[in-house]
Image: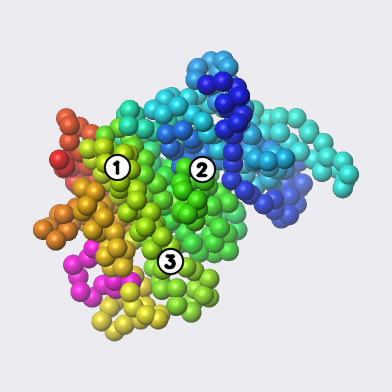
Amino acid sequence: MTRREFLGAAASTAVAPSGTANQDAAARPSARLIASAPVLMNAAESSVGVAFAVSADASGWVDVSLRPDMGDAMRVYSGTGAVMRVDARFATIRTCGLRPATRYYYRIGADRIAFDDDYKRSNLGAEVDPKGRSFATLGAAAEGSFCVIQDTHSRLPIVDMVLAKLSELKPSVIVWNGDARNFYRTYRDAVGTFLRPHPKWPEYAAESPLMFLNGNHDFRGRFGLHLEDLMMFREQSERHARYAGLGRNFVQRLGDIALIGLDTGEDKQDTNPILAGITRMTEYRKLQTRWRAEAIEEPAIRTAKFKVAFCHIPLFDRRTNENPGDVLPADDDPRYRHPWAAWQRTCATMWGPLFAKAGVQLVVTGHQHCFRYDPPTRERPWAHMVGGGPDFVPGQSRGYPTVIEGRVRDGRLAITVHDCGNNRIVFDRTFA
Ligand SMILES: [Fe+2]
Ligand SMILES: [Fe+2]
């Protein structure tokens, strides 16, 4: 790739500086500027996002090269347009214009920016993280595995178990299938959850990109309303303008597997008064249905031998006392155990036929905090899986956290479910 291609491709998400963070940073002028390892996100054929924490006003950047020695490295800055983005909380950088199924080497850095007064600002110099890292772009020619995690809810012992398993498995991508935390009151909650999730595993996503999908909890708290400030939406240019609002949805090829990301949204109705009338999940789900109907006709899906879809809230439950998420106006119905959606019948009705038409083999969900496998039936030709949760007690055989691993093995889609609490495999099956 030429330098011109690289510079033309650089982009990033929008992040507003925080006055509170500025004050905190001013109180720690000697702190390291780069305050976390990089976290990769939203991997695609030609782009990947990079985010890391900073401790003071800074403009972050990434050097990217096809060579391990970083020869011919191109620098991609945070922000587009007339000025680089300066932020005292974190840097979010989008590297675009990459080659599919290609390994790139990278390092991160940040320029420390001081605002001396209203008319003068200073660049106090760059801090460079000397550690060399790499990532691989996706595509039909890509190789490797995916791993799914969900419902960690920022419980440190659970996060430790799950990230330890990821460190062992080293997947090509990590689908983080929601409920990473209960709520995000400020940006600090999000930085702690995603950029520094556990002190033992600072590099957990430095070489395996996150494909993050919201759980119902990830919309909660003031910062959670716009979690995309840190957990970047997918690159805008990689979807049609009419789907601009679908920042989380993805269809990406990982070799023979098409990975399909969907967002089931909140587990309460838009009309439920506790949501203050500011959610639009009903329309959001319908828009995803239209996108999905078009997406299954794309070559990325049509030509994929295996198709796996991901969303947080289950799309099936055989139990009749579990709330299917379609109780108006406020989710409360004496027939059901809880006044919130245990599963999403509306999404199942809209998306299920599309899964069948596309030949989706497996839908991976979470939300219920207990691993379950629902084999396909005549009416529902796709298998359905619910990942484990955060309520693990050592010695118990239920409620354990899981890592769901998928890869192509001997020409078949192999799905292995790791019980991270008891360090055992609880499911190992192949799909044709
Ligand atoms: Fe959860
Ligand atoms: Fe949930």
Name the secondary structure under disc 2: helix
Answer few, some or many: residues within 10 Å of disc 2's Cα (few below 14, many 20 plus, some between 14 and 19): few
Q: Earlier in the sequence, mark 2 or mark 3?
A: 2
| Residue 317 painted magenta | yes
* Residue at 56% in and 20% down: 2
Q: Report which residue position mark 3 lands on.
A: 283
Q: What count of labels does the image hold? A: 3
Magenta part of the chain: 314-325
Q: Earlier in the sequence, mark 2 or mark 1?
A: 2
* Residue at 43% in and 37% down: 44
Q: Earlier in the sequence, mark 1 or mark 3?
A: 3
| Residue 244 painted magenta | no
Left or right: 340, with 205 as reference point: left
Q: Report which residue position mark 2 lands on.
A: 237
Res 140 visible: yes
* Residue at 34% in and 51% down: 294
Q: Report which residue position mark 1 lands on.
A: 301
Q: Is mark 2 within 8 Å of ligand 2?
A: no
* Residue at 50% in and 24% down: 105
Place of residue 348 in the rendered image (x, y in percent of width and height, measured from the top left): 27, 63
